[in-house]
Image (cartoon, helix red, strand yellow):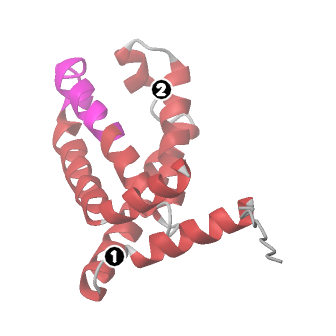
Amino acid sequence: MKQTTKETAVITTTARVTAARLAIREARPRRLTSTLLWAAQILMAAVFVMAALAKLTGGLEQEFADIGAGQWLMYFVGTTELAGAIGLLTPWLAGLAAAGLAAEMAGATIINATVLHNTTYGVNVGLTLVLFAVTGLIAYGRRRQIKALWAAIRR
């Protein structure tokens, strides 16, 4: 008499999170590259926290008034910059946060170059371009972790 057991694997949310963390940990870059990326991430997190606080405390009302989108945009950008800075300091979110901040800085560069070019804020094009480049390099350096996170989310 043959007995067969049919086992079905039950994948819990905890198991998925654990598998995702292991996949992201395996996708880490080499030691020197990781050290350089962490140094850049800490520096960029500090820069974006300062920028976010300037926006969230209302220190840049005139700049956003010149854009013409309203003050809601100032608070939205400040919130996304603060969330991105926190994400840069979170190991498994660092790549995704850097990609989001790079996209935000690309938009800021375009706005500064086109809408604000005749104002005193037009000189910020260089600053936002540098921030875009650095956050883009961080995202590129963490690209394997972004792919592992995406694969873990899709499961």
The segment highlighted magenta reads: 104-122
**92, 53: nearer the viewer:** 92
Place of residue 43 in the rendered image (x, y in percent of width and height, measured from the top left):
36, 67
Q: x, y (%) of residue 119?
A: 23, 22
Q: Residue furthest top?
A: 68
Which secondary structure lies at badge 1?
A: helix
Instruction: Indicate whether 104 appears above or below 114.
Output: below
Q: Main secondary structure of the magenta part?
A: helix
Q: Tell me the tag on residue 146.
A: none
Between 31 and 150, the residue placed more toward the observer is 150
Q: Which badge, 2 or 1, is on the more N-terminal residue? A: 1
On the image, which quarter does residue 67 sit in? top left
Horizontal side of 47 relative to 116 (left or right) equals: right
Please give the residue where the numbered disc 1 appears in the rendered image: 39
Which residue in the protein does label 2 denote?
61
Q: Secondary structure at mark 2?
A: helix
**Where in the figure is residue 148, as x and y percent of width and height?**
43, 62
Quarter of the image holding residue 113? top left
Vertical arrangement, residue 80 with respect to residue 110, above or below: below
The residue positioned farthest toward the bottom in the image shown: 31
Work out whether 20 lies above or below 53: below
> Which amino acid type is marked by label 1?
Ala
Can you tell which of label 2 and label 1 is closer to the viewer? 1
Total marks in image:
2
71 lies above or below 4: above
The image position of residue 132, as x and y in percent, is 24, 47
Quarter of the rendering occupied by the N terminus: bottom right
Residue at (79% x, 70% y) in the render: 5
Q: Residues within 10 Å of mark 1 (few under 14, many from 20)?
A: few
What residue is drawn where x is 55% and y is 31%? 75
Residue at x 26%, y 66% (from the top left corner): 141
